[in-house]
Each structure stands twice: as structure tokens, then as C-alpha cells.
């Protein structure tokens, strides 16, 4: 197979396939290249490290979710419902790589999920885009709090998702709903998730977004 016919997503899938088989720590760039049908030189032309491959995977997932969020956008739903739907779309996009991600988390040792997700601040970057897709501003210091809060919600839910092998992801959905509610409770009256694009408007997560003016 010619290099140009091998998509980046094929490389991500190959990396996770190898990791699921022998563990992420033992996975070599040469193993990923062989599984993907590339020479080592061809893989090097796209990625310069295993971390870069992993980062590419999560950027790929970001794109899938953002495209899906744009197609399914509904201004009549509440901010919490938007976030719930967007993050569940994210878990759907991650599902094909779950065995490999389990291996990455397992081999991260003490860092676990935090190390796997936060390498190169990738989790904060992704959560910033997820909030924007939900119509929630990430600008300024308050926006930064929203990003960090959603990162905590997502990382906590990942722990359940990794153990959830059901087809409907019922346990993951329940955990995500619970974690979003907890985040709102911590934020009390002025939830960082609930505030939309206007600095003077602070609806809670259950509130419907304010109509455009």
C-alpha cells in the first residue's frame, strides 16, 4: 500500500492495536510503522515520536466531535445538554481505540489517566474546543476556569468509560451526567459552565441558552 493511501487515522489505529497487544511502554515506532504498512522513514515524515502519534489521535477525535457538533447543533437545548451530547460524541469517537487507550493508561503508572490525557496539555486544548462547540465562551480567566472544570469532569468520566463494555455506554452516560451535576454544584450560583458568551449572563447548566439578539 502506497504511503499516500494510508491515512493518519490508520496510523492512530495501528498504534492503538499494537499497544493493546504488547502495552504502550513496549510499543516502538518501528512496530507502529509495520502495523500501519509504512516504512520507518515514512512514519518519521508524519510523526517524530509516540507522543506525537497519541497527540494526533486526540486531534483526530477533536475534529470528529466538532464536525458532529456542528451538524447536530440545536439552539433550543440547555448548555448542560449540549455538553453532555458533545462529550458522549467524544466517547463514541474514542470507542474504536479503547483497548489501546487502556494500555496507555495502564503503562502510565502513577500518572494514569491524567498523564495520558494531559500530555502536552492536550486535554485542556480539547476541552476548550468542546466548550466552544457547546456555545460556551472560553475567553478570559473565567473561561479558563470553565476549561479546567470540564477537564476534571471528562477525566473522571474516562475512568468509568474504560470499564464500560456495554453497547449503549449506560454507565458512562450516568457517570457523565453525575459529574456534570457535581461540577455545577461546586460552582454554585455562578456556574462557569452555565455562562454563555455574554459576560453578564449566567444561566445554570439546566437553563436554555439565551436567544440570539
Image (cartoon, rainbow, N blue to C red):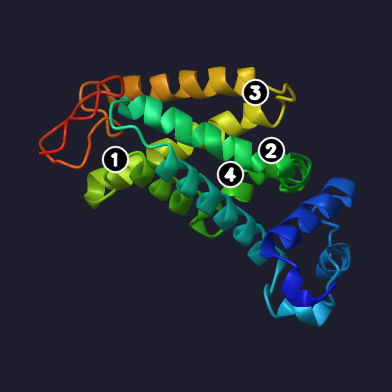
Q: Please, what secondary structure does the residue beneath circle 2 have?
A: helix
- Nearer to the camera, 183 or 4: 4
Q: Are marks 4 and 1 in contact (CB under 8 Å)?
A: no
Q: Are marks 4 and 2 in contact (CB under 8 Å)?
A: no
Q: Please, what secondary structure does the residue beneath circle 3 have?
A: loop
User: Relative to 206, does residue 85 appear above or below in the rendering?
Assistant: below
Question: In the image, what residue occupies the spot 84% across and 59% down?
Answer: 27
Label whose residue precedes the other's in the sequence (4 or 1):
4
Q: Please, what secondary structure does the residue beneath circle 4 have?
A: helix
Label whose residue precedes the other's in the sequence (1 or 3):
1
Total numbered circles: 4
Q: Nearer the viewer, mark 4 or mark 2?
A: 2
Cα gap from disc 4 to disc 2, whole angstroms: 18 Å
Cα gap from disc 4 to disc 3, whole angstroms: 22 Å
Q: Which residue is mark 4?
A: 114
Question: In the image, what residue occupies the spot 46% across and 40% down?
Answer: 151
Q: Which residue is mark 3?
A: 169
Quadrant where the N terminus sits is bottom right
User: Relative to 37, does residue 147 appear above or below in the rendering?
Assistant: above
Q: Which residue is mark 2?
A: 95
Residue 43 visible, this orientation: no
Label whose residue precedes the other's in the sequence (4 or 3):
4
Label whose residue precedes the other's in the sequence (2 or 1):
2
- Sort mark 2 into few (<14), some (14-19) or many (20+) by Cα contacts within 10 Å: some
Q: Are marks 3 and 2 in contact (CB under 8 Å)?
A: no
Question: In the image, what residue occupies the spot 85% across and 77% down?
Answer: 39
Q: Which residue is mark 1?
A: 136
Quadrant where the C terminus sits is top left
Residue 105, horizontal then vertical, whole percent: 71, 43
Q: Is residue 125 left or right of residue 64?
A: left
Q: Are marks 4 and 3 in contact (CB under 8 Å)?
A: no
Amino acid at each position: 500500500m502506497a504511503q499516500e493511501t494510508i491515512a493518519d487515522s490508520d496510523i492512530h489505529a495501528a498504534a492503538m492495536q499494537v499497544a493493546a497487544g504488547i502495552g504502550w511502554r513496549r510499543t516502538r515506532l518501528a512496530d507502529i510503522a509495520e502495523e500501519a504498512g509504512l516504512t520507518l522513514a515514512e512514519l518519521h515524515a508524519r510523526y517524530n515520536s509516540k507522543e506525537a502519534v497519541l497527540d494526533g489521535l486526540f486531534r483526530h477525535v477533536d475534529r470528529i466531535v466538532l464536525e458532529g457538533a456542528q451538524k447536530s447543533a440545536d439552539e433550543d437545548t440547555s448548555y448542560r445538554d449540549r455538553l453532555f451530547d458533545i462529550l458522549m460524541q467524544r466517547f463514541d469517537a474514542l470507542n474504536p481505540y479503547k483497548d489501546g487507550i487502556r494500555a496507555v493508561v495502564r503503562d502510565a503508572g502513577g500518572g494514569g489517566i491524567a498523564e495520558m490525557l494531559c500530555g502536552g496539555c492536550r486535554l485542556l486544548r480539547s476541552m476548550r474546543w468542546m466548550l466552544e462547540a457547546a456555545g460556551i465562551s472560553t475567553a478570559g480567566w473565567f473561561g479558563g476556569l470553565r476549561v479546567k472544570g470540564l477537564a476534571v469532569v471528562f477525566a473522571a468520566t474516562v475512568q468509568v468509560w474504560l470499564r464500560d463494555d456495554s453497547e449503549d455506554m449506560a454507565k458512562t452516560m450516568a457517570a457523565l451526567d453525575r459529574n456534570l451535576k457535581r461540577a455545577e454544584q461546586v460552582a454554585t450560583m455562578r456556574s462557569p459552565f452555565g455562562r454563555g458568551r455574554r459576560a453578564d449572563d449566567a444561566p445554570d447548566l439546566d437553563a436554555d441558552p439565551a436567544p440570539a439578539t
